[in-house]
Image (spheres, grey):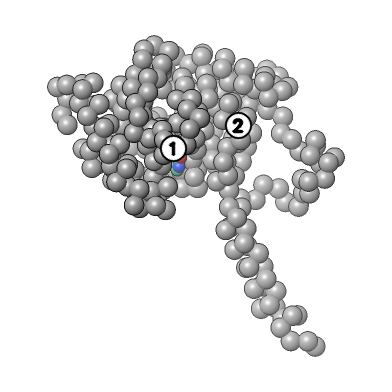
Amino acid sequence: MSGDRTSPDAGLDAVRGLLAFYLDAGVDALLVETPQDRLRPDDLAAHSPAPQAVTTAVAAPPTSTPRHSAPARAAAPAAREPVGAAPATPDDAVMAARTAARSAATLEELAAILAGFEGCPLKATATRLCFADGRPGAPVMFVGEAPGRDEDLEGLPFVGRSGKLLDRMMAAIGLARSDTYIANVVPWRPPGNRTPTPLETQICLPFIQRQIELADPDVLVCLGAPAAQTLIGTREGIMKTRGRWFTYHTGRREIRAIATLHPAYLLRQPLAKRLAWRDFLAIKAALAAARPGAPT
Ligand code: URA
């Protein structure tokens, strides 16, 4: 008998080490039971996800309903049952998203349409749809990149560590969550918190654009570079973009838009909070100018 190499403890340690490695690499969700070699050329074609059907009729899916909701929080979306053929190509999926988003007359309808939309592959791996938090119609709307693990479990944007910091930053300029409306460009968590692919972002874009239009804020705040690049269209890095005012066309009217540093970045780089503080003071001033009589 040789010692450690065959002992049950050594085997367990090896498994624990492997799981720790996966977690560090952001792999924290099991997608299929058997391992897949996605680098084999024949597997690449077989596994590229075809976008699926857009939907139109209503039913409530357990996977898209937040576990709790405060009065100020957005209503849990009721999903629509899939009808029609799956979009055959990525372009079809983007077109289907545009048509579906345009068909929503209210935020509730938009949430229901999104909850039943099968054209974005992220829906299949996410636990819940994270549609929005805060108060529709609030003067300021914050938009992040995509939900993380906590958001995916709760079905609400910015409820994890980044969200707690965002709450404190908003409170510092006199805003409670219920004074704001909060969403993400991509409403489903990418597996392992990876960055959404450009196609996933393009498919989700019509929905967040429509959400901004229907929420109708006076001021739009993009949290981090991905949200700024997607919504404002800037190609520059966040350090160049942050703190500058842009005009955003909602489809109904022009509003003011600004980008600031993402709270997750500020958790890693606390010294950068002074830059974010300047941005938040600018947001406070813009809100006071947009609604002069409102409490500040
Ligand atoms: N990061 C985001 O961009 N959005 C969230 O909802 C949470 C973390």
Q: Quadrant of residue 117?
A: top right
Q: Quadrant of ligand 1?
A: top left
Please state which amino acid type lies under the numbered disc 1: Ile
In the rendered image of this protein, does residue 14 appear above or below residue 189? below
At label 2, the amino acid type is Pro
In the rendering, which numbered label is found on residue 198? 2
- CB of residue at label 1: within 8 Å of ligand 1? no
* Residue 31 at x, y percent in the picture: 67, 47
Measuring from the top left, give residue 158's x and y in whole percent.
Answer: 40, 41
**259 or 16: nearer the viewer:** 259
206 shown above or below 152: above
- Dot 1 corresponds to which residue? 238
Q: Is residue 41 visible?
A: yes
Residue at image point 17% right, 25% down: 294
- Say whether residue 178 is left or right of residue 105: left
Image quadrant in which you'd find residue 222: top left
Provide the secondary structure element on which disc 1 rests. helix
Residue at the image point whose x is 51% and y is 13% from the top: 103
Instruction: Give the image location of residue 159, x and y in percent.
Output: 39, 44
Q: Secondary structure at mark 2?
A: helix
Residue pictured at 35% horizontal, 48% vertical:
272
Q: Residues within 10 Å of mark 2 (few under 14, many from 20)?
A: few
Q: Is residue 162 visible?
A: no
Relative to 268, say whether 191 is above or below: above
In the picture, the quarter occupied by the N terminus is bottom right
Looking at this view, name the residue that lies furthest to the top: 252
Quadrant into which the C terminus falls? top left
Residue 73 occupies which quadrant of the picture? Answer: top left
Query: Which mark's residue is nearer the viewer, 2 or 1?
Result: 1
Residue behind label 2 places its C-beta within 8 angstroms of ligand 1 = no
